[in-house]
Structure formats: structure tokens, C-alpha cells
Amino acid sequence: MALAEWEGGRYRSAPDIVVLARAYEEGRVLVSCDCHTIPPLVQQLASTGQHHAGVILVASRSFRPTDVGGLLEALCGLTGQVDNWEDELVFLKRVP
């Protein structure tokens, strides 16, 4: 679900830490193109003993914004690869 749709867009302009905390409460893995600020934030959470429900990062050089099919295929390819997403950080890779 897109952030703009999740809970009526309530978290659309919320700080990343707030989004991650709420996603953790609901057991939602965050899929983000923000490969610059999310990794340090996840590292900060780990250093303070806080948790997140999982993060999948999508590098803009790996997927064009219009390549929805490729993105979905790669996301579906992750199914079953990780048993427990809690505190996992994965960079999404294109399916060969």
C-alpha cells in the first residue's frame, strides 16, 4: 500500500522514524527508494535497541520509476527468502 493511501495519508509527511515505528506496530515492511537516509536511520535504531518490521530499498539505478512490472517481479522474488523480516534491510535486485 502506498504511503499516500496508508491510514488516509496520515504519514505522508511524517518523519521516517515515525513511519518506521508505525509500520513496526502493524508488522509492515517498508519499501522505499530513499537509499540515502533510511540505512543510517535503521543503523541508529539498531544501536539503540529499537526494532523495525523490515526495509526493502529500491535503488533508482536498478529500477526505472515506470518499471512497475520489474519491481513487482523482484518483490515477489523475495517471497520465501526471508523467514522473519524484523530488523532486516535488503536492497532489491532485479530478477535475471
Image (cartoon, rainbow, N blue to C red):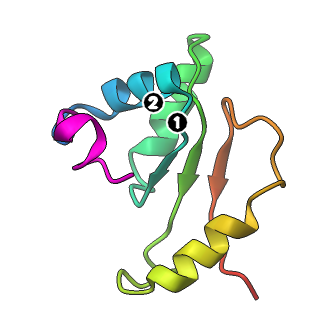
Instruction: State the residue at coordinates (45%, 56%).
Output: 35
Q: How many marks?
A: 2
Residue at (36% x, 86% y) in the render: 66
Instruction: Give the residue pinned by disc 1.
Output: 28
Magenta: main secondary structure: loop
In the rendered view, tell whether residue 7 sits above or below residue 75.
Answer: above
- Mark number displayed over residue 23: 2
Q: Earlier in the sequence, mark 1 or mark 2?
A: 2
Residue at left 38%, top 45%? 37
Magenta range: 1-11
Residue 94 placement: quadrant: bottom right
* Lateral position of residue 46 relative to residue 19, left or right: right
Indicate whether 19 appears above or below 93: above
Callout 1 environment at 10 Å: few (<14), some (14 to 19), or many (20+)?
A: some
Q: Given contact means CB atoms under 8 Å apart, are the residues at marks 1 and 2 in contact?
A: yes
Q: How far apart are the alpha carbons under marks 1 and 2?
A: 5 Å
Residue 41 appears left or right of 81: left
Quick one: 4 or 50, which is closer to the camera? 4
Classify 10 Å Cα crowding around label 2: few (below 14), some (14-19), many (20 and above).
Answer: some
Name the residue type under label 1.
Arg
Q: Is residue 47 above or below residue 37?
A: above
Q: Is residue 65 magenta?
A: no
Query: In the displayed structure, would residue 50 be above or below residue 41?
Result: above
Q: In this orientation, which residue lies closer to the viewer: 42 or 51? A: 51
| Amino acid residing under circle 2 | Ala
Badge 1 element: loop
Q: Position of residue 40 (x, y in %)?
A: 48, 37
Q: Position of residue 68 (x, y in %)?
A: 45, 80
